[in-house]
Image (tube, grey):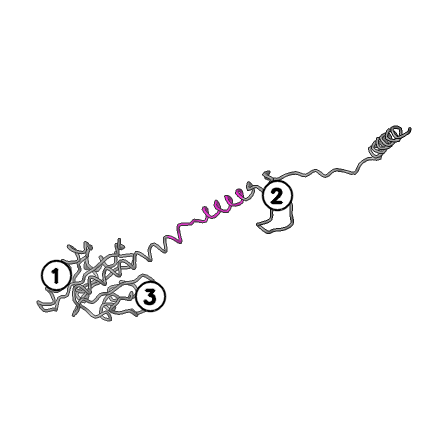
Amino acid sequence: MAAKIPIVFSQGTNIGPQQRDHEETLIAELLMEDRIEVSLIAALDQLEDDDTDRLCLLGFQGDFVLMSSLDSSQVFVELERLGVEGQQGPTTFEPSGRLRLQQTRRKIYHVCVANRRRSEVRDEITRIREDAQIETVSISGIDSLTPDRQTDNSLDTVVKEQNEPITSPLSSDDDPNNNGQAVESTGLSQSIVPLGPSSAEDDDDAMDIELDSLVDELDELDL
């Protein structure tokens, strides 16, 4: 589904009956066949500061499409006069657009309908709306991971690593085909208590036991 980028149609005043019929038929096709909402305003060169159509243009905060029978250079001169800021967005008819010395980064896509087939204009409107949808999805995908969620993911990773069993092979060979057995340890932190040095008393007891055993063996051999 294409994005709902606003579509504005500025109807011409000083145009012949054939061009007027062309505009009216195009508007009807956009509304009825393409199911696109279109805001109709008067000719840009006829708007004044207190006109409601000017307030309509000022009400758009993001990108929008402006259709008219005027040349693009004249359209943006009129927009600047009315205080409507925006960079000229590229279209199939004018791929390069035109950079304006303004702080705003929003785009105004002007589509001139004069001397163009209605099918061409409708296809261009559809393309702009689809491109706007792709850009919106990309940006929202970047913002979907918040700093809090990043912190939670980091903590989850640490806990998971601590709880994973530690497997240490008996053999020093790292070959996965090695038939050496492995020893598995599942504790979070396994304590190892080193054995202290044997006392002198323990050494004497051990020596006595060995001597007694040796004497018994000699007695058995004595014939």
Q: Position of residue 70 (x, y in %)?
A: 19, 69
In this view, the residue in front, 165 or 57, is: 165
Task: Examine the structure image and report whether residue 137 is included in the region drawn in magenta.
Answer: no
Left-right relation of 22 to 90: left
**Residue numbers of the magenta segment:** 141-160
Q: Position of residue 177 (x, y in %)?
A: 58, 49
Task: Examine the structure image and report whether residue 148 is included in the region drawn in magenta.
Answer: yes
Task: Name which residue lies at 63% across and 39% down.
Answer: 190
Name the residue beneath numbered marker 1.
Answer: 25
Name the residue beneath numbered marker 3.
Answer: 102
The kind of residue tagged 1 is Thr
Left-right relation of 103 to 211: left
Circle 2: element type: loop
Name the residue beneath numbered marker 2.
Answer: 181
Name which quarter of the figure residue 8 lies in.
Answer: bottom left
Q: CA distance from mark 3 to mark 1?
A: 35 Å
The kind of residue tagged 2 is Gln
Q: Nearer the viewer, mark 2 or mark 1?
A: 2
Q: Is residue 44 above or below residue 138?
A: below
Circle 3: element type: loop
Q: CA distance from mark 2 to mark 3?
A: 71 Å
In this view, the residue in front, 167 or 18, is: 167
Name which quarter of the figure residue 18 lies in.
Answer: bottom left
